[in-house]
Amino acid sequence: MGVQVVIVGAGRVGPALARLLTRAGYRLLGVAAPSADAARRACDYAGAGRPVQDAADLTREADLTFLATPDDVIGNVCRALADAGAFRPGSVVAHCSGALPSEVLAPARPAGAHVGSLHPLQSFASAEEAVRVLPGCRCAIEGDPEAVGLLRTVAEDIGGRPFVIRPEAKPLYHAAAVFASNYLVAVEAAAVRLAEAAGIPRAEALDALLPLIRGTVSNIERVGIPECLTGPIARGDAETVRRHCTEIARHAADLLPLYTLLGRQTVRVAVARGGLDEAAVHALEEALRPAPGPSPAHP
C-alpha cells in the first residue's frame, strides 16, 4: 500500500496537490473542506478520494496530512484536529505556506506526528495552472527531520525540485519571494504610470514594456546577476539619472522616493558588476540623493 494522503483545503493548492499526488501513485484518502461541494469538486479533479467536511474522519488513517488552507487558519485547524485526536503517531503533518514556519503545526507533535512545510516557489491563479507549473518548480522544505525526508520525496514525485531551509529562515525566504514576484508587479505599475505621464495610453504602455520585462528576465536567467545589468546606472550616466529625477518630481512626485531608493540599490549592483570608477559612483549617488524636506518653522 502506498503513502496515504489527506488534503485539508480545496482552494488552489489543495486540489492541485490531490491530482498530482494521485497521478504519482499516492493513495488519496480524501479532501476535506468546509464546503461539501468544494471537497467533492477537488476529489473529482483528483480522480480519487472521499470528500468530507470534517477532516478528522480521514486524518486518523493518514500517513501524510497537508493543511492547504489560508495562512491565517492553519494553526487553528491544526489545533482543532489535534484536540480531536486526529493525528496518529509517526504520521507527517505539513502545510504549504511560504510565510509560516512548520512550528505553527506544533499542536500535532504530542500525538507523535512530525511537522513540516512544503512551499512551491511559484504563483498560480487556479488549480489547473498549479498542476501545469508545479512540475519543475523549486519547492522550499523545512521542519522535523522525518517530515523533511518525506516531503522531499513528495516534491520529487510530483516533479518538483526541492531544497531545504532552516525553519527560522522562513520569513527571509518569503521576503525574497515577495521581492521577486509581488514587488515586481509594483515596479511595473510604476513604469506604466511614468509611461502614461509621457503620453502613452495605459494599454499601449504595458504592451510596449512587456518585451523589455521578458528580455530582462531572460538576461537574468542567461547571464546572471550582476552581469545582466544595463542602463544609465550601469554606464555611470549620472546626468540622465538627474533628468529622470527632475521629471519624475514634476509629473509623479510620489514615485521619486521609489526611484531613488531602487537607484541606490542599482548602484551597488553596478559596482559589483565592475566598470564604474569612484568618481562615477559618487556622481550617481549625488544624483540619487533624496531631496531635502522643508525647513522646520522657527518660533
Image: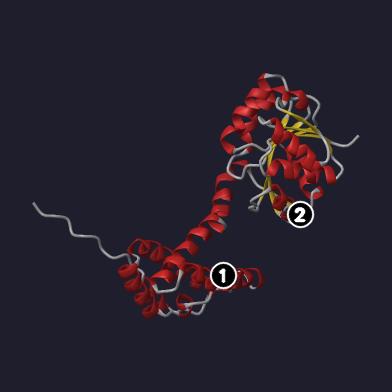
Colour scheme in the image?
A: secondary structure
* x and y percentages locating residue 128 in the rendered image: 72, 50
Residue density around tag 1, few if under 14, some if 14–19, many if 20 or more, within 10 Å: few
N-term-proximal mark, 1 vs 2: 2
Observer-nearest residue: 123 or 227? 123
Label 1 and label 2: CA atoms lie apart by 25 Å
Residue name at image x 64 percent, y 36 percent: 69
Q: Which mark is residue 164?
A: none
Q: Which residue is mark 1?
A: 210
Residue 23 image position (x, y, % from top left)? 84, 46
Give the quadrant of the N terminus: top right
> With respect to residue 150, does 83 lie above or below?
above
**154, 275: nearer the viewer:** 154
Residue type beneath disc 1:
Leu
Residue 196 in the image: above or below residue 176: below
Helix, strand or loop under label 2? loop
For disc 2, the marked residue is 135
- Residue 197 visible in the snapshot: yes
Label 1 vs label 2, nearer the camera: 1
Q: Position of residue 6 (x, y in %)?
A: 76, 33
SS class, disc 1: helix
Residue 66 visible in image? no
Question: Furthest residue to the left?
Answer: 299
* Residue at 42% over, 80% down: 237
Give the quarter of the image for residue 286: bottom left
Name the residue furthest top. 84
